[in-house]
Amino acid sequence: MIRKKQKNPESDSINTIENSKNYITLSHPSLYFFSTLLLVMTFVSGYFFGKVNGTEKTSPTAIAPSQQAQQQAQQPAKPQISIDTIKDLFAKNVVKFGKGDKKLLMVMVSDPSCPYCHVAGGANKEIGAKMGPQFAAGTYVAPVTEMKKLIDQGKADFVWLYTNGHGNGELATKAIYCANDQGKFWQAHDLLMSAKGYTLINDEVKNDIAKSQIMADFLASAVNKNELKSCLDSGKYNNRLAEDSALATSLGVNGTPGFYLNTTNFAGAYSWTDMKSVADAAL
């Protein structure tokens, strides 16, 4: 008697799948080419799109925009911010100008070591020219410069918060807090946000408290340098960095710079031309 060989359904299925894979691989090499091309195009488009807003995330170096997009997709949705939430900031221990009772309330979340913050600050013209045509003089209007005009005119109130956007701004931020104690916030801010300030912060002092004298000497034209050094060395503001960062997170700001004009959020180094209509509507 001759026995017929029994088929193994599982084995046949595996063979069929394997044969199908081989067929696809051999018959359609163009699939691999187009898949690779699609990945490259996605990265390139993501890179240039991310450059427009100019936001840095919390790492010592800027994260590639394609990675930023992936991180943002994983982050929880931004909280709904009410005008009362913005007003409440003025009751907290923060750098502030005004009582929070103006028609226009402005918030900036910044890091003195962040290049995009320097662009937005308006005191470092050199860095903007290196970061793309959208930040070039004549095209880009630094928002902080225009916001300060509204503050000086008594038309708007303002809060400044720190969060880590580039990794080297802790000592500089403490210096800003200390300068604010002397009523010299803007003077110290503008010096630190200059081209020389950027180099000092990122290449020389970084976050080293042992270099508090260097920081104090750099700001001597704006503040009492002895008082500033004493303030830095005392550790008075060691916890303030985390407090500011927590407030920034509560506002849904995870990168620098970040702005609020009343309840409208601008996540990135937007030109004032893109923000002005919101300010005008409030005023």
Image (tube, rainbow, N blue to C red):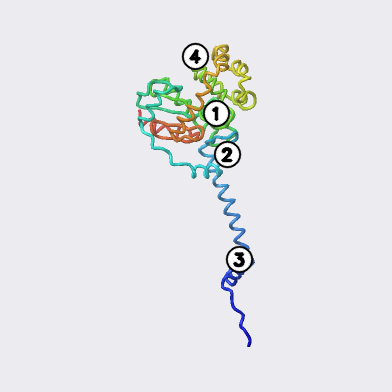
* Residue that badge 3 annotates: 21
Q: Nearer the viewer, residue 139 or 225?
A: 225
Mark 4 or mark 1: which is in front? 4
Helix, strand or loop at disc 2? Answer: loop
Mark 3 or mark 2: which is in front? 3
Residue 75 to residue 4: above or below: above
Q: Which mark is residue 63?
A: 2
Separation of residues labelled 4 and 3 (CA atoms): 72 Å
Q: Dot 4: within a 10 Å radius of its alpha carbon, few (fewer than 14), some, or many (20 or more) residues?
A: some
Q: Dot 1: within a 10 Å radius of its alpha carbon, few (fewer than 14), some, or many (20 or more) residues?
A: many
Separation of residues labelled 2 and 1 (CA atoms): 17 Å
Helix, strand or loop at disc 3? Answer: helix
Mark 2 or mark 1: which is in front? 2
Taking the view exactly as shown, the residue that stands out farthest to the front is: 1
Tag 1: residue type? His
Q: Nearer the viewer, residue 225 or 264?
A: 225
